[in-house]
Image (tube, grey):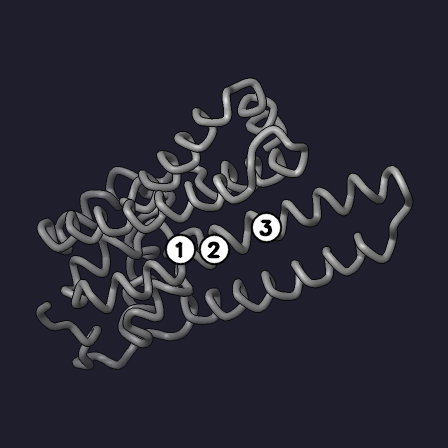
Amino acid sequence: MVDVQHWLSALPPLAVYLIVAGVIGVESMGIPLPGEIVLVSTALLAATGVVEPEWVAGAAAFGAIVGDSVGYAVGRRGGRPLLERLGRRFPRHLGPAHLARAEQSFARHGVWAVFFGRFVALLRILAGPLAGALRVPYRRFLVANAAGGLLWAFGTTYLLFTVGRAAEHWLKDISWAGLALAVLAGLGSTWWLRRRARRMSEEPAVPAGAEPVRAGTD
């Protein structure tokens, strides 16, 4: 991650924003890329003043929402065979076991799996294509997708930006209180979201014959 941050710092700000949006967008389409590493590195870079945090968060949110929507359209057109082909191409990330866990999350939680999936690496990659393949109504998908993407992008960016600035201030003025409050608030909210999302992805499968997800038409 340090190497990524160093590489990004050598680029002009506009190029950094485009890379953030592009990497996260492609990851959200269903292609395993280090979207979270890029966002974390760029958010920490914003704490040094090289880029602006609002543009970093906006680029991440744009990439997440648009990428998930493209992934949804691809999944709706290609269906489950497409997901299985992706699994054969990327077995370490999208193999049969990963796909089964993601389907279980959708079966139990519907579009909420899209919202919380933004905070889990596996569901972050599969949410769009899987929602499309399962024929989740696009309006419901878009609401959950946009809410999760905005919260993930702005929350992650400003959490790390605040922690980075507090750490910088601490190194100069030994401000323990500011650093401790920033770290505790960030860790607490992140822990709750990841714990909730992980619990959703690890819950047991639904009984045989049960409806996999409330699908419908737009």
**Circle 1: element type:** helix
Give the quadrant of residue 127. Answer: bottom left
* SS at badge 3: helix
| Residue 131 disc label | none
How far across and down, in percent of the image, does residue 50 sit? 61, 28
Residue 143, horizontal then vertical, whole percent: 29, 65
Query: Do labels 2 and 1 touch, CB within 8 Å?
Result: yes
Instruction: Give the answer, above or below, for where 146 lies relative to 164.
Output: below
Disc 2 crowd rating (10 Å Cα; few below 14, some 14-19, many 20+) is: many
Residue 185 found in image quarter: bottom right
> Position of 74 compared to 197: left or right?
left
Q: Quadrant of the N terminus?
A: top right
Disc 3 residue type (three-letter): Tyr
User: What residue is shown with label 1?
Assistant: 149
Q: Position of residue 62 (x, y in %)?
A: 35, 45
Q: Residue at x 48, y 40 (%)?
A: 55
Amino acid type assigned to the residue bearing label 2 in the image = Trp
